[in-house]
Amino acid sequence: MRILVKNIKGLYQVEQTKRMAVCGNDMADLPCIENAFLIAQDGIITDFGRMEDLQEPNADKVYDAYNRYVLPCFADSHTHLVYAGSREIEYIDKIRGLSYEEIAERGGGIVNSALRLQQTDEQQLYEEAMQRIDSMIKHGTGAIEIKSGYGFTLEAEMKMLRVIRKIKENSPAIIKANFLGAHGIPLEYRGRQSEFVDDLVIKQMIPMVAKENLADFIDVFCDKGFFTVEETDRILFEGVKYGLKPKIHANELAKSGGIQVGVKYNALSVDHIEHTGKEEMEVLMASQTMPTILPGAAFFLNMPYAPAKDMIAYGLPVAMASDFNPGSSPSGNMQLILTFACVNYRLTPQQAINATTINSAYAMDAVEQCGSICKGKRANFFITKEIPTIEYIPYYYGENKVDKVFLNGKEQ
């Protein structure tokens, strides 16, 4: 099927050749073609340019984007959207002053989600997750990385990953699966954390995940009160042996060494990274690891903000993702992440869009498929409503500025 989108007010994030990421000062640039067209054939972008250069206007379906913008869909490279139930009571505990660590210590947080997930069947988890994904797509997201980690047992982790596999098979979005067996410490392993790491995560979970081909990535929550650098090293070493690409939760609560161990294993990304200084930036500059900031979690937990502008000034790329989860970031709305990027991290809208499209696509190993408007990439894009400028998207927060979403060239 051939589709044509014509009379586009501004076609953004265009590139003639595929880039892997946008770094440093280049993040301020967002290439645009005004008064443009876009053609997709069988789900792939085949042509784009100025309307005056349109040679073959014939198409099976034509969309008139007069007074509207077109952008590539967001890539959300960090979510935990397969979960059971909500945790609004802990939200009240946070309002009353309890910290993330204090809630976790008394059996809340990740432990709470794990207990609920263990009691929920696969079909219910799948149906609830698909409803969340549907909402994300309507707000412009076209690629999603989904983590396990609320299992805490071999059986429950496999259940989560099978749900993610079913989502991958049935969702029009690009879906990547991340095995996060080391997300928290089960209550029965408190005081025996290394035993949990070695006997359950390394010896049982990783081989089973690999045998059933259930994950693209392996992840560890390497941070204060969770998993140490040494434990993280052992887990990543084993995961890489089985062909799983590393990603890391790092430096959310303190300078944990997580960035360094992530770079050691050539992690695709190190995520959260609120506590990042010059030493960490130097390590990242010498790597191909994408620093990924999760503004929703920092906002919801009232935490310090990662030094995004400092990292960009240092010459690094920066990605941003939602961290959609029931405890610390209960939203998968990437338009809201754009607003946080601009208001809380002082990025320009152009920098924020680069952080949530091409750079976040890199962070989930999907940049060859999405993240920009480029010939040969999937036709995953959205048409905005009639808005005055591209800056209006993060400015006018709280309302969906997306009119139509296309995934694989099909209107959703």
Image (cartoon, grey):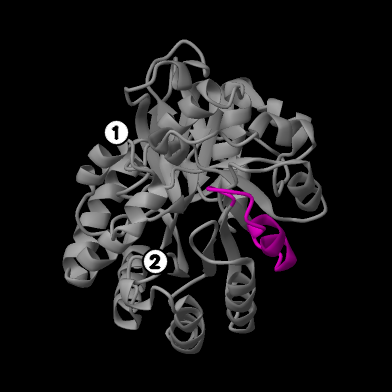
Residue drawn at the location 50% of the way across and 42% of the way down: 294
Q: Can you say whether 133 is above or below 177 in the image?
A: above
**Magenta segment: does it hold 257?**
yes
Task: Say which quarter of the image contains residue 17.
Answer: top right
Task: Give the image location of residue 372, x and y in percent.
Answer: 59, 41
Q: Which residue is mark 2?
A: 148
Q: Which residues are magenta?
A: 251-268
Task: Give the image location of residue 175, x and y in percent.
Answer: 43, 59
Q: How far apart are the alpha carbons under marks 2 and 1?
A: 27 Å
- Amino acid type assigned to the residue bearing label 1 in the image: Ile
Residue drawn at the location 33% of the way across and 36% of the way down: 97
Q: Can you say whether 8 is above or below 271 in the image?
A: above
Q: Which mark is residue 95?
A: 1
Left or right relative to 80: residue 4: right
Q: Can you say whether 111 is above or below 49 in the image?
A: below
Does any portion of residue 131 appear in the rendered image?
yes
Q: Which residue is farthest top?
A: 388
Task: Give the image location of residue 168, x and y in percent.
Answer: 38, 64
Left or right relative to 412: residue 10: right
- Amino acid type assigned to the residue bearing label 2 in the image: Ser
Q: Nearer the viewer, residue 332 or 175?
A: 332
Task: Say which quarter of the image contains residue 184.
Answer: bottom left
Task: Give the image location of residue 403, x and y in percent.
Answer: 34, 28
Residue drawn at the location 29% of the way across and 33% of the way down: 95
**Magenta segment: does it hold 359?**
no
Q: Nearer the viewer, residue 148 or 273?
A: 273
